[in-house]
Image (spheres, grey):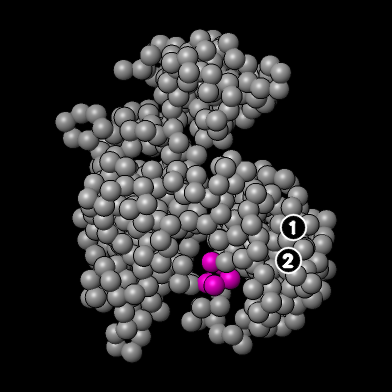
């Protein structure tokens, strides 16, 4: 039962979904946002009391927070915010929209099982794969969270007029969302990998990692990455408190074996699918496929449905997406690479692509830059020495990237970066846009950044009519 005095902190698409959720239950919440004109403000009913752009001494307006019985906070607002800490100390409960979904899924005689997916990289790919496998198997599934549909909208039918009859929910969850979802008890949960990210919000990599690992608490199955010991449940939980499974590139559990003269994805040493039949490239995507198989097995999705999806899945936009071949130069868009780990994986994916040999890749040019979020960029140094012909840098933290090596170049923006690469690259080369940084210094999100890159590439050497 929801209390009557609810405050929604942060509007936008997710805040609006929470608003509609409350209104449908006869509760008129208060809405707060630090922006004077937040997205979705024009959709608020006139009866909604709101606090937009009103700050006290540089912080959130405290009185409405303390007057609430429940605060439903946007993932972008840290629980460590002083005003939220004061509210917590005053006995105000603070949760996120995912928590509301989790509570609803647990209701009734037949609770809706949840698959929960997190990690520094690959979350959207694995979430989409498992969702498509469920659809292929004829399961009524809702896919959302940190991807696509706001979580609470999954509870409605396609017209958003009636309750949906879901049989399964698959959630991509960020560390921010996990902070405010204490009741999560997934049927299967995974942490795909851990690399430095969001260190502008967390005080250490350990703090960030442990927040991610919280997804395993109360899960019926913890699926971890054998290749990354930072994902292991034993770091946070006693080994006998949760059943485990794992994926990796050896022949154990969900893994990879040699069979009939080639590499195959495998389950308990039994061949499942030749790696050559995957359209998503690189060892990191093989790990993503294996993680999806492990999660799908837990909800009894038939192997045939899993294989059908793995064979046809071509990847997600802005994730190592082939854009164009211009004068023999391949241009790749990986705007979703918002941290160093994702950039390393993108480069590895190109280098280990059995369908694109070294001769076809030629020299590799990297476009990087944006908001570094407190990361250590030094893992890029060996690549600048051995694998990259050069790196062109733009954005807020470009100076940190420039300092890594001598084969770097500074430009003002993405347009200049594309022009610089076009001038340097020759037929047979590859240009990879994998920024290793967030986009918010210059773009609204990584999608807008990726779309701008695509437009810039498509405009190269356009013949005048």
Q: Are marks 2 and 1 in contact (CB under 8 Å)?
A: yes
Residue that carries the numbered disc 2 in the rendered image: 404
Residue that carries the numbered disc 1 in the rendered image: 400
* Secondary element at image label 2: loop
Q: Point out residue 82 in the picture as x, y percentages from the top left corner.
A: 59, 24
Left or right side of 121 for 254 = left
Quadrant of the rendered structure where residue 260 is? bottom left
* Residue 455 shows up from this direction: no
Front position in the image: 258 or 44: 258
Q: Point out residue 155 in the picture as x, y percentages from the top left corner.
A: 35, 33
- Residue in view at x 54 percent, y 10 percent: 47
Q: Point out residue 427 in the picture as x, y percentages from the top left corner.
A: 72, 83
Q: How many other residues sit within 10 Å of disc 2, few (<14), some (14-19) or many (≥20)?
A: some
Q: Main secondary structure of the magenta part?
A: helix
Q: Is residue 347 magenta?
A: yes
Q: Quadrant of the N terminus?
A: top left
* Residue bounds of the magenta highlight: 345-349
* Secondary element at image label 1: helix
Please say if 61 is above or below 160.
above
Quadrant of the rendered structure where residue 401 is? bottom right
Front position in the image: 98 or 316: 98
Q: Is residue 62 magenta?
A: no
Left or right side of 101 for 374 = right
* Residue 205 shows up from this direction: yes
Separation of disc 2 and disc 1 at Cα? 7 Å
Q: Quadrant of the C terminus?
A: bottom right
- Residue in view at x 62 percent, y 43 percent: 200
Q: Residue furthest bottom?
A: 261
- Residue in view at x 74 percent, y 52 percent: 397
């Amino acid at each position: 039962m929801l209390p009557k005095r609810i405050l929604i902190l942060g509007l936008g698409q997710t805040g609006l979904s929470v608003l509609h959720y409350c209104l449908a239950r006869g509760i008129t919440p208060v809405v707060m946002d630090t922006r004077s004109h937040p997205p979705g403000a024009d959709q608020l009913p006139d009866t909604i009391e709101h606090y937009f752009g009103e700050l006290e001494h540089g912080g959130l307006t405290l009185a409405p927070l303390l007057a609430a019985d429940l605060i439903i906070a946007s993932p972008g607002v840290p629980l460590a915010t002083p005003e939220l800490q004061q509210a917590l100390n005053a006995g105000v409960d603070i949760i996120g929209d995912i928590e509301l979904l989790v509570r609803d899924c647990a209701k009734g005689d037949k609770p809706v099982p949840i698959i929960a997916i997190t990690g520094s990289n690959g979350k959207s790919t694995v979430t989409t794969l498992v969702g498509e496998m469920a659809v292929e198997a004829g399961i009524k599934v809702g896919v959302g969270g940190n991807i696509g549909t706001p979580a609470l909208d999954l509870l409605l039918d396609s017209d958003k007029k009636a309750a949906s009859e879901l049989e399964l929910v698959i959630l991509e969850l960020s560390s921010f969302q996990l902070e405010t979802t204490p009741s999560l008890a997934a049927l299967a949960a995974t942490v795909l990998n851990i690399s430095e990210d969001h260190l502008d919000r967390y005080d250490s990599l350990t703090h960030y990692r442990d927040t991610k690992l919280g997804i395993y608490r109360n899960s019926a199955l913890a699926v971890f990455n054998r290749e990354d010991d930072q994902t292991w449940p034993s770091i946070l939980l006693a080994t006998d408190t949760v059943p485990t499974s794992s994926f990796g590139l050896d022949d154990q559990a969900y893994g990879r074996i040699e069979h009939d003269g080639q590499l195959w994805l495998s389950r308990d040493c039994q061949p499942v699918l030749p790696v050559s039949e995957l359209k998503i490239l690189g060892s990191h995507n093989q790990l993503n496929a294996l993680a999806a198989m492990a999660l799908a097995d837990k909800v009894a999705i038939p192997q045939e449905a899993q294989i059908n999806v793995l064979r046809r899945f071509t990847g997600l936009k802005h994730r190592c997406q082939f854009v164009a071949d211009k004068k023999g130069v391949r241009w790749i868009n990986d705007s979703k690479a918002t941290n160093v780990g994702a950039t390393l994986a993108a480069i590895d994916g190109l280098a280990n692509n059995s369908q694109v040999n070294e001769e076809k890749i030629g020299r590799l040019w990297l476009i990087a830059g944006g908001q570094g979020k407190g990361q250590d960029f030094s893992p890029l140094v060996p690549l600048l020495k051995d694998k990259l012909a050069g790196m062109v840098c733009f954005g807020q933290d470009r100076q940190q990237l420039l300092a890594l090596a001598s084969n770097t170049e500074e430009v003002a923006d993405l347009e200049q970066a594309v022009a610089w690469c076009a001038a340097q690259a020759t037929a047979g080369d590859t240009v990879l846009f994998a920024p290793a940084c967030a986009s918010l210094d210059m773009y609204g999100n990584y999608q807008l950044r990726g779309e701008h890159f695509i437009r810039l590439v498509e405009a190269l050497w356009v013949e005048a009519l």
